[in-house]
Image (cartoon, rainbow, N blue to C red):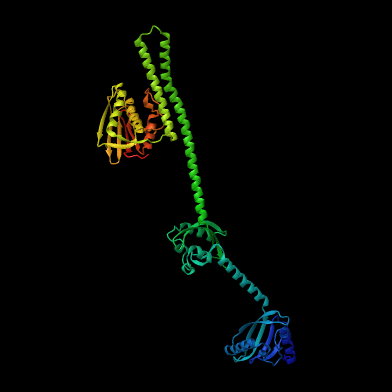
């Protein structure tokens, strides 16, 4: 086979290089133009300051800055015998900026010597425009994140902080260099239980959807802050989870306001329950009052009616002794009814706050002797005596004498009334610092254990009282009186063995 002629080889070479999609310029080792294809010829006409021809130095076709750069590149290619790249932007004849990529590829012969250089020029304008758009968008996104009015924190899959924005720095007080490469829980959750965050973190790493939770963090100054966080995955180019992005808002004030509202609702609910309970108790009290009052008033009224009827039927024939007995009975029952009404009116005054304290100086010994003398008249009717013991009592106290009388008389008459067949009830009074301690004890029927907490309720009478008269208001009045005097009252009792009431009141009262 004979070798084709040189002209044929050149035609084939020219055809090949003219069909290339990139501009090709073949340079000798000194940078002179040997050959170029049609695309390079078009580029030569539209971009270069001086169109090049075969035999021209390529750098003579470019501006000064570009020629110096290309000259250095050609020298590097010759010395290193490796390909080099160069990027440049040129304006075409229309004034449009064109981005070009120059690839200088050395051609080495069998002896390792450079024979010439292939220069491939590619128009990368669209690529550069796209890159600029990407860079601009990335810068805009970065600026948006940095300036956003929200906490934005980046973390890797181990929980180490990789990024945070200015708003996060502002509200937490931590500088970026204090947080970068630190574990989130170590810096922003110091002395705060991290278990909730660990749960949120693990859930977000394994979920394709954003996870929203409230999280308590601690600021640089040590203050607690509540963040409403939305945690979403950060993915690599291959779709692998490489961390989380936390976007949050400071909802501390909102949370505190919500908690305050919840507490207010709870408080109002409790108030409503108390009001309903009070209303229920009022209804029960009214029911008990009607029941007891009807019973307590019926007996004396029946007796009075009977005595009046007896007097009318025997008018003119009745002996004085019988008349006196009837009148005494009427007087006794009228007095009993008057006492019942007095108890009801006194209780009503204590409930509605109509009682005003009348503070005076009281000579204690004379006051106590007067009380014992008054109650003893009632005790004599049932053959009972009051045993007294006064220890270290003060000479004078300042208090409301009327309320004190009510306390002593109610407790002592109750003790006598609920000690049928017993010969003694006991009154002990002693001074203790700024207090007066009063103990009224009996050895009577006692109070069942399940009723001891209810004895101060109005119109409530125990199961063991039997036929003993009363409205169930005495102890309620005593308790209210003690409270008005800023004192306390306690009861201790055992069925069949008696009851003891202990009252403690201050010796000095103010109006």
Q: Which residue is outermost to the top?
A: 317
Q: x%, y% of residue 35?
A: 70, 89
Q: x%, y% of residue 244?
A: 53, 63
- Give the camera-side residue of 7 and 482: 482
Taking 69 as reference, is 495 left or right? left
- Give the camera-side residue of 53 and 332: 332
Above or below: residue 507 compared with residue 165: above
Taking 441 as reference, is 455 left or right? right
Quadrant where the C terminus lies?
top left
Which residue is rendered at x = 47% and y = 36% of the image? 277
Query: Does residue 166 appear anywhere in the picture?
Result: yes
Query: Does residue 243 appear anywhere in the picture?
Result: no
> In the figure, residue 14 lies in which quadrant?
bottom right
Above or below: residue 337 compared with residue 12: above
Quadrant where the N terminus lies?
bottom right
- Give the camera-side residue of 232 and 142: 142
Above or below: residue 3 compared with residue 340: below
Above or below: residue 449 compared with residue 303: below
Taking 215 as reference, is 450 left or right? left
Q: Number of callouts in the render?
A: 0
- Give the camera-side residue of 471 and 211: 471
Taking 471 as reference, is 210 left or right? right
Which residue is rendered at x = 29% and y = 37% of the image? 396
Q: x%, y% of residue 192?
A: 44, 58
> In the figure, residue 318 lies in which quadrant?
top left
Q: x%, y% of residue 292?
A: 43, 25
Which residue is rendered at x = 30% and y = 37% of the image? 397
């Amino acid at each position: 086979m004979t070798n084709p002629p040189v002209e044929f080889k050149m035609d084939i070479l020219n055809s090949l290089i003219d069909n290339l999609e990139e501009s090709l310029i073949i340079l000798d080792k000194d940078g002179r133009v040997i050959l170029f294809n049609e695309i390079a010829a078009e580029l030569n006409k539209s971009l270069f300051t001086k169109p090049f021809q075969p035999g021209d130095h390529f750098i003579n076709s470019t501006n000064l800055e570009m020629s110096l750069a290309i000259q250095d590149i050609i020298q590097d290619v010759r010395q290193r015998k490796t390909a080099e790249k160069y990027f440049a932007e040129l304006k075409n004849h229309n004034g449009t900026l064109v981005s070009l990529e120059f690839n200088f590829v050395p051609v080495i012969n069998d002896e390792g010597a450079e024979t010439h250089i292939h220069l491939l020029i590619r128009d990368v304008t669209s690529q550069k425009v796209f890159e600029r758009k990407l860079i601009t968008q990335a810068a805009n996104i970065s600026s948006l994140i940095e300036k956003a009015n929200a906490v934005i924190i980046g973390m890797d899959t181990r929980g180490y902080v990789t990024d945070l924005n200015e708003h996060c720095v502002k509200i937490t007080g931590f500088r970026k260099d204090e947080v970068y490469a630190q574990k989130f829980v170590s810096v922003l959750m110091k002395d705060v239980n991290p278990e909730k965050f660990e749960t949120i973190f693990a859930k977000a790493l394994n979920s394709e959807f954003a996870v929203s939770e409230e999280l308590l963090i601690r600021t640089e100054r040590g203050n607690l802050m509540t963040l409403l966080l939305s945690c979403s995955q950060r993915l690599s180019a291959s779709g692998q989870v490489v961390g989380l992005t936390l976007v949050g808002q400071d909802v501390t004030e909102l949370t505190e306001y919500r908690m305050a509202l919840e507490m207010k609702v709870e408080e109002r609910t409790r108030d409503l329950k108390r009001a309903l309970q009070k209303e229920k108790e009022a209804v029960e009290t009214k029911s008990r009052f009607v029941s007891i009052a009807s019973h307590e008033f019926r007996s004396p009224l029946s007796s009075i009616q009977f005595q009046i009827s007896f007097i009318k039927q025997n008018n003119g024939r009745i002996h004085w002794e019988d008349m006196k007995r009837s009148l005494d009975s009427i007087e006794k029952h009228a007095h009993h009814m008057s006492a019942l009404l007095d108890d009801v009116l006194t209780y009503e005054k204590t409930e509605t706050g109509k009682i005003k304290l009348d503070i005076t100086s009281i000579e204690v010994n004379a006051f106590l002797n007067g009380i014992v003398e008054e109650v003893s008249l009632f005790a004599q009717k049932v053959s009972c005596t009051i045993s007294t013991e006064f220890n270290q009592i003060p000479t004078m106290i300042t208090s409301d004498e009327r309320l004190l009388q009510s306390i002593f008389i109610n407790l002592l008459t109750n003790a006598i009334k609920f000690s049928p067949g017993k010969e003694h009830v006991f009154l002990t009074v002693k001074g203790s610092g700024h207090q007066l301690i009063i103990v009224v004890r009996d050895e009577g029927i006692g109070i069942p254990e399940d009723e001891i907490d209810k004895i101060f309720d109005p119109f409530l009478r125990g199961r063991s009282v039997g036929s003993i008269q009363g409205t169930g208001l005495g102890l309620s009045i005593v308790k209210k009186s003690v409270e008005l005097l800023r004192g306390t009252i306690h009861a201790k009792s055992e069925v069949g063995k008696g009851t003891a009431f202990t009252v403690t009141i201050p010796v000095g009262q103010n109006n």
